[in-house]
Amino acid sequence: MLQLLKNLSFHIWHKSAWPLLGLLGCVALACGARKSSAPGGKIFDGIGFADTSAYPMRVTFKGSTADTARALSNLRAELADILSGREFRKTVTSVKIVFFEPNDSLHDVFALDPNAIILPASTEKLFTSSSTLWALGSKYSFTTKIDLAPGATVQGSRITGNVYLRPTGDPTLRSIDLDDLASQLRAKGITSIQGDIISDLAGENPLSDEAKQYMATQQVHEISVHDSIVGENGIVASLDSAGADSTADEDEDQGEAGALSLFPNFSLDRNIVSVTVLGGEAKGSPVSVRVNPPISIVKVSNYGTSSAPAKVHTRRVGRGRHRRTIRTFSRGAMTLRVSSKGEPTDPVQTIAIAGQIPARSQRTYRFALRNVPLAMAAVMKWRLAQSGITLTGRPRVERAPSQEGETLAMKHTKLIDLLTQMNKRSDNYLAESMFRKLSTIASVAATAPDERARKLMHSWLQVCNVDGTKCTFIDGSGLSKSNRTTASTVVNLLAAIKQQGLFETFTHTLSVAGYDGTLRNRMKGTPAQYNAHGKTGTLNGVTALAGYVTTGDGQLAAYFITMQHYRGGPWAFKRDQNEIVEALAGFKYADYQTIEPGLR
C-alpha cells in the first residue's frame, strides 16, 4: 500500500525544470500570478499576488417580484444550450449551480449529472484551504522564532548558552527572511552567541479551539486509502505523467520548484538548493561550482573538467551570384553528470560533479535539501555572521523537551496570506504544505500522519453537514488521479462556507475573473469580470471551474463545472465554462421572465 507523505520527502517541480536527479521525483507546480494592471490592485511585498479587497463580492439581493419560475426556466434553457455542442458528445460533463436566497437557503438552478464521481483536479484546493482555515483558525500565523535554550542567559551583548530555531512550517520562508531574525537580535545589542544553534524538532499542536471541541466530541472513522501520486518505484510523478495538461493555456499558472521534507515544520527556499557548474576558460581546465544558498552541510565533490569551448566557424561556398557564407556551430563535449547523495538525517549532503562541460559555458541543476532542519540551522548561522553576530558553536538538531524559553526574535506569516497565494496561483507546493501541516497535529488520532490530514478534512465536511462519503483525499493539491469528489459536494461545500460565516475571508483567497490569479485572462469585458471569484482545475483530460458569482440582481450563486475524459486541448470547454458564469452574472429575473426559452 502506497501512502502519500510516508516517503522521506518528495519533489514538486515545474514541468520544464531539469530532469530528476537523485532518489526523489518531481511534480509541476503553479507559479505567481502576474501583476495586474486593473485599477485598485496592489502587490503584496515578496509574494506576488494581487490584493483583491477592491473587488469584494457584493450580495444585495432582497427578493424579486418577477415571475421567478419562468425566468429560471429560461436561464436553464440557455445553460443547457451552452452545454449542447458537439464537443460534449464523448465528454463526461458534471455541473451544479445554486442560488442563495436572502436567508442563505439554497435554490437549485441547474444540474447535469451532479452526483457523478469525478476528478477534482486543483479544485481540491477548495477542500484543503477551507479545512485548514477551520482546523488552524483564520487568525493563525506561521512563526519562525529564535528562543533561548534552558540555562542560556543574555549578558549585555553576549548570549551564553544555546539558542533554538523554532519554525512552524512556513512554506514561503526564504534564506533572506532569516536576516530579519538576525536584525532583531542585533537591535537588542547582541553581537555574540557562545553556544550552538539548534533546530528544534518538537514542533507545535495548533488545532483551533473550535476544531478541538469538535474532535473531542465526535467519533470520526479512519479513512483508508490505497493509492497516491507516489509510484511503485518511490518516485513522485511529474505533473505531465500525473495528469497535468501539457497544452493548458496561459490562465493556468506554472513555475517554481519545491520539495517536501521529512520534517513538515521545516521549510527554507522551498527546500531546494541550486548548483551551477561553470566551465573553465580553456579545454582541460577544472570547472567551478556555485551552491545557492551557500549551506555548510552541502559539500561539493568536484571532478568535472572543461571540454573545448563552443565555436562558430564560417566558410564561403558556391560561385558567382550563388556564392554565400555558411556558419556552423561546434559544441564541446557535454558529458557532465551532477548528482546528490544524502539521507534526511545525514549531517552532510554531497553534490558530486563528474564529466565534462564546454569551456566558458554553465549549467544549473536543482536538488531537494535532504536534512532541512540542519540546513536551516546552518543558514541561520551564516545569516547571523552576515549581520555581525558571532556564533561560536555549531548548527545541530534535537527535539527539545518543551517549548519553553525566552523568544529573542520572531517572524510571522499569516495563514490567510498563504491560502490566498495558494488558491490564486493554484500553487501545488503550498497546497501540499498545508496538507502536511494538518498531518502534524498530534492531538488528532490516526494511524499515520497523512491520515490525520484526511481525518481533519472529512471532519470539516461533517461540521458543514456536507456528505463526504464520495470524497477521496489523497493529497492537498489535486495532482493525484486517485482524488475523487462530486459536483454536488463541491457546491455544498461552497454553500456551507457562506453559512459558516467564512464567506468574506474565503472568497478573498480566490481568483477574480479578468483580474488576477488563474482567472486573470478569462471573462474580460463581461458582467463576470471583477465579479466572479473562483478556482480552476486542470489535469490531462480534465478542466474544472468552481466558485461564486453575483447575478445582475445582486443574488449570490455558487457553481461547479467540469468536463472530463475529453481529447485535445481544454480551450473550447473553458470557453463554455466562461459562458455559463457570464450568463449567471448577467441574469436578472425581470429580463428573463419575458424571453422565450432558447431565444436568448
Image (spheres, rainbow, N blue to C red):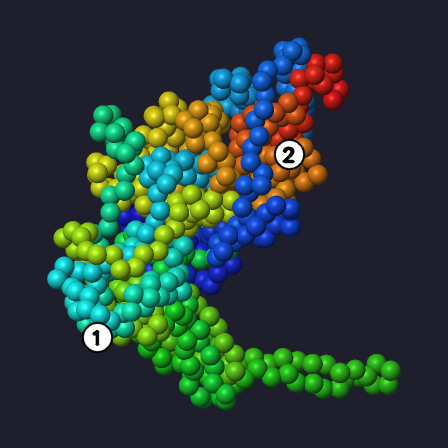
Is residue 365 visible in the rendered image? The answer is: yes
Tell me the quarter of the picture where residue 371 sits.
bottom left
Q: Is residue 152 left or right of residue 88?
A: left
Query: Is 162 placed above or below 505 here?
Result: below
* 558, 478: nearer the viewer: 558
Tell me the quarter of the picture where residue 305 sits.
bottom left
* 583, 506: nearer the viewer: 506
Query: Is 172 placed above or below 419 here?
Result: below
Q: Is residue 275 left or right of residue 192?
A: right
Q: Amino acid at mark 1?
A: Thr
**Residue 392: numbered disc:** 1
Q: Which of labels 1 and 2 is toward the front?
A: 1
Query: Quarter holding the N terminus?
Result: top left
Query: Quarter holding the C terminus?
Result: top right
Q: Is residue 43 left or right of residue 591?
A: left
Q: Position of residue 11 (x, y in %)?
A: 38, 55
Q: Amino acid at mark 2?
A: Ala
User: Which residue shows up at 46% across the image and 79% down it?
Assistant: 278
Residue position for label 2 = 528
* 112, 398: nearer the viewer: 398
